Image (tube, grey):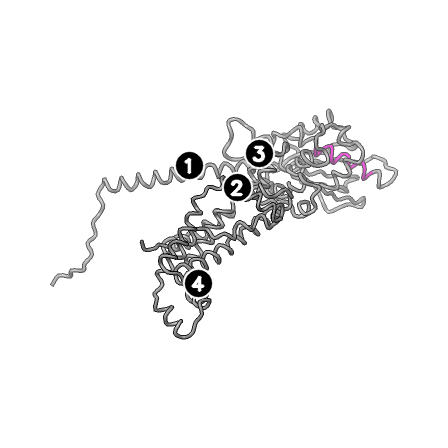
C-alpha cells in the first residue's frame, strides 16, 4: 500500500534558480543603496575638519595620525619653577594650536607635547583634534586669528592649557616620547614652528603614529560640544549633550506609558461597557481626530497652552500625550473584542469589578499589542521636532532634535560634528528596531482585527 503522505521534492528548474538569484542580487543592491547615506554619515563624522569638505568626497576616513612633539629645555636657565612652567605652557599652546591650524589637512587627530630637560620628561600635554577645534570655534580662541601674539595674549595660554590638561613636575614624570619619532612630519613641524610660532625651547623631535581609534574618540567631544556653545547654562555645561538625551527619554517615556494606559482604558470602555452603537460613535470620535491636520490646530493649541501656563516647561512637552491616539484605541478595541466573552462572564459571576476585568484579563492578554504600541510610540515620537521647538525657549528643556537644529544653526559648527550628533540621535531607533524586530513582527501579526 502506497504512503499517501509521502513528500515529493521537486527540484527548481534553471529559470526558477535564475529568478531567485536575481531577486537576491536586487535585494542586496537596494539594501546597499538604502544604507549608503547612513554609512556615509558615520564615515563623515570620523573625518577631520578639512577632509569633510573634500570634493569629490571619500567614503572612508583617512588613517588617524597621532603626532608627538618633543621640546627640549636643557641648558636654559629659569629663575624659578613658575617661570619654567610658564615657558612650557606657552610652547604647548603654540605647538598645539599652530599645528592644528596650519596642518589641518594632514589628518592629525591627536597632538602630544613633551617637555624635556637634562634627559627627563618634566612636562606633558595631550589634546584631541576636536578639543582644539572647539577651543578655536567656541572657547578661549573663538573669533580670533591663530597667531603667536594672539595665542599668548594675557592669560589665554594658561586658561587654554588648563582646559586641555597637562602634567608638570620638575623632578620628572612617568611620560616618555616614543623612540624613532623622526618622519615626514618633522620637517613640516620644524618649519612651521620656526617661521610662525617660535618656541622658548628647542624642537628636539616630531613624528607620528597611526591610531585609527582616534576617529571614534571624536564622538566624545561631539557630546561635550553643547557645553562650549552654551557656557552660560550650568546644566548643559555639566552634562553636555546628555541633557538633551535625558529630555527626550523623559518625553518619550511619558508618551509610551500614557498611550499604553489611556488607549487601553478607552478601548476597554468602548468594547465592554458601551453598547455597540455608542461604542462605534465614540470610536469614530477618536478616529476622526486622526484626520485633523496638526497645522490647523497648532496655533490655537499653542495659545491655549500658554494661557494655562504650559509653556517653556515640561508640562508643555508632556500634556499633548494625554490625548489617546485613535489608531491605538482601534487596535486595543479590536483585540478586546476577540477575547471570549466567557472569561468576563465567569469573572463577573464571582463578583469581579470592571477594574479587575481590565487589569487581570484584558491587559495580561494584550502583551503583543502593548509592545507594538510602545515601540511605535517610541519610533514615531523620538524624531518629533516641531511642537517641542514651538513650546521651549529654555535650552535645558530642548529635546534631541531641537538641540540638533539649534546647534546646526551655530556658525561654528562643522559638518563632521553635525554628522556625529545626528548619528548619536538616530542610533537608539536603529538599535531598538534591530533588537525588537522579532517582537515587532509578532505584535503586528497579533494586532490583526476582524472586519
Q: Tag 1 or tag 2, which sits nearer the N-term?
A: 1
Q: Tag 4 or tag 3, which sits nearer the N-term?
A: 4
Q: Closer to the camera: disc 3 or disc 2?
A: 2
Residue 133, quarter of the rendered image: top right
Segment tinted magenta in the rendering: 84-97
Would you name the residue on which mark 3 appears?
A: 415
Q: Is residue 57 found left or right of 84 in the rendered image? A: left
The secondary element bearing badge 4 is classed as helix
Would you name the residue on which mark 2 appears?
A: 298
Q: Tag 1 or tag 4, which sits nearer the N-term?
A: 1
Q: Tag 1 or tag 3, which sits nearer the N-term?
A: 1
Pointers 3 and 2 in contact (C-beta within 8 Å)? no
Does the magenta portion include 96?
yes
Pointers 2 and 1 in contact (C-beta within 8 Å)? no
Residue depicted at 44% across the width and 47% down the height = 289
Give residue 201's position: percent from left, percent from top. 78, 33
Q: Closer to the camera: disc 4 or disc 2?
A: 2
Would you name the residue on which mark 1 appears?
A: 33
Q: Tag 2 or tag 3, which sits nearer the N-term?
A: 2
Would you name the residue on which mark 4 appears?
A: 363
In this view, the residue farthest toward the left is 1
Pointers 3 and 1 in contact (C-beta within 8 Å)? no
Mark 4 to mark 2 CA distance (whole Å) = 34 Å
Mark 3 to mark 1 CA distance (whole Å) = 22 Å
Mark 2 to mark 1 CA distance (whole Å) = 36 Å
Give residue 207's position: percent from left, percent from top. 65, 34
The secondary element bearing badge 3 is classed as helix
Mark 3 to mark 4 CA distance (whole Å) = 47 Å
Amino acid at each position: 500500500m502506497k504512503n499517501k503522505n509521502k513528500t515529493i521534492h521537486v527540484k527548481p528548474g534553471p529559470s526558477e534558480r535564475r529568478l531567485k538569484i536575481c531577486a537576491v542580487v536586487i535585494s542586496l543592491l537596494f539594501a546597499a543603496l538604502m544604507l549608503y547615506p547612513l554609512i556615509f554619515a558615520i564615515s563623515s563624522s570620523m573625518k577631520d575638519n578639512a577632509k569633510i569638505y573634500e570634493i569629490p568626497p571619500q567614503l572612508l576616513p583617512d588613517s588617524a595620525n597621532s603626532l608627538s612633539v618633543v621640546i627640549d629645555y636643557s641648558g636654559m636657565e629659569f629663575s624659578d619653577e613658575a617661570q619654567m612652567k610658564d615657558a612650557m605652557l606657552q610652547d604647548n599652546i603654540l605647538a598645539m594650536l599652530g599645528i592644528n591650524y596650519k596642518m589641518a589637512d594632514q589628518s592629525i587627530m591627536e597632538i602630544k607635547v613633551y617637555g624635556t630637560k637634562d634627559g627627563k620628561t618634566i612636562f606633558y600635554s595631550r589634546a584631541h583634534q576636536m578639543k582644539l577645534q572647539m577651543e578655536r570655534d567656541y572657547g578661549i580662541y573663538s573669533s580670533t586669528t591663530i597667531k603667536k601674539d594672539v595665542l599668548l595674549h594675557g592669560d589665554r595660554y594658561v586658561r587654554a592649557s588648563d582646559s586641555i590638561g597637562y602634567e608638570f613636575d620638575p623632578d620628572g614624570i612617568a611620560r616618555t616620547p616614543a623612540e624613532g619619532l623622526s618622519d615626514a612630519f618633522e620637517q613640516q613641524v620644524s618649519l612651521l614652528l620656526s617661521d610662525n610660532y617660535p618656541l622658548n625651547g628647542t624642537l628636539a623631535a616630531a613624528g607620528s603614529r597611526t591610531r585609527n581609534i582616534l576617529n571614534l574618540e571624536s564622538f566624545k567631544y561631539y557630546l561635550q560640544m553643547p557645553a562650549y556653545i552654551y557656557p552660560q547654562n550650568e546644566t548643559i555645561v555639566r552634562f553636555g549633550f546628555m541633557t538633551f538625551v535625558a529630555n527626550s527619554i523623559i518625553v518619550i517615556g511619558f508618551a509610551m506609558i500614557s498611550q499604553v494606559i489611556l488607549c487601553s482604558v478607552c478601548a476597554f470602555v468602548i468594547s465592554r461597557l458601551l453598547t455597540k452603537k455608542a461604542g462605534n460613535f465614540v470610536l469614530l470620535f477618536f478616529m476622526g481626530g486622526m484626520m485633523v491636520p496638526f497645522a490647523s490646530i497648532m496655533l490655537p493649541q499653542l495659545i491655549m497652552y500658554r494661557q494655562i501656563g504650559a509653556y517653556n516647561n515640561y508640562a508643555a512637552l508632556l500634556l499633548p500625550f494625554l490625548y489617546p491616539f485613535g489608531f491605538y484605541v482601534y487596535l486595543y478595541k479590536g483585540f478586546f473584542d476577540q477575547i471570549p466573552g466567557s472569561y468576563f462572564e465567569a469573572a463577573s459571576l464571582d463578583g469581579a469589578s470592571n477594574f479587575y476585568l481590565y487589569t487581570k484579563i484584558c491587559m495580561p492578554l494584550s502583551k503583543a499589542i502593548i509592545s507594538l504600541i510602545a515601540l511605535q510610540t517610541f519610533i514615531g515620537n523620538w524624531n518629533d521636532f516641531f511642537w517641542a521647538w514651538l513650546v521651549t525657549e529654555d535650552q535645558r528643556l530642548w529635546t534631541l532634535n531641537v538641540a540638533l537644529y539649534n546647534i546646526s544653526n551655530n556658525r561654528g559648527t562643522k559638518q563632521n560634528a553635525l554628522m556625529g550628533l545626528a548619528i548619536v540621535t538616530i542610533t537608539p531607533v536603529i538599535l531598538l528596531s534591530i533588537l525588537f524586530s522579532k517582537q515587532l513582527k509578532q505584535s503586528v501579526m497579533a494586532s490583526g482585527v476582524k472586519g
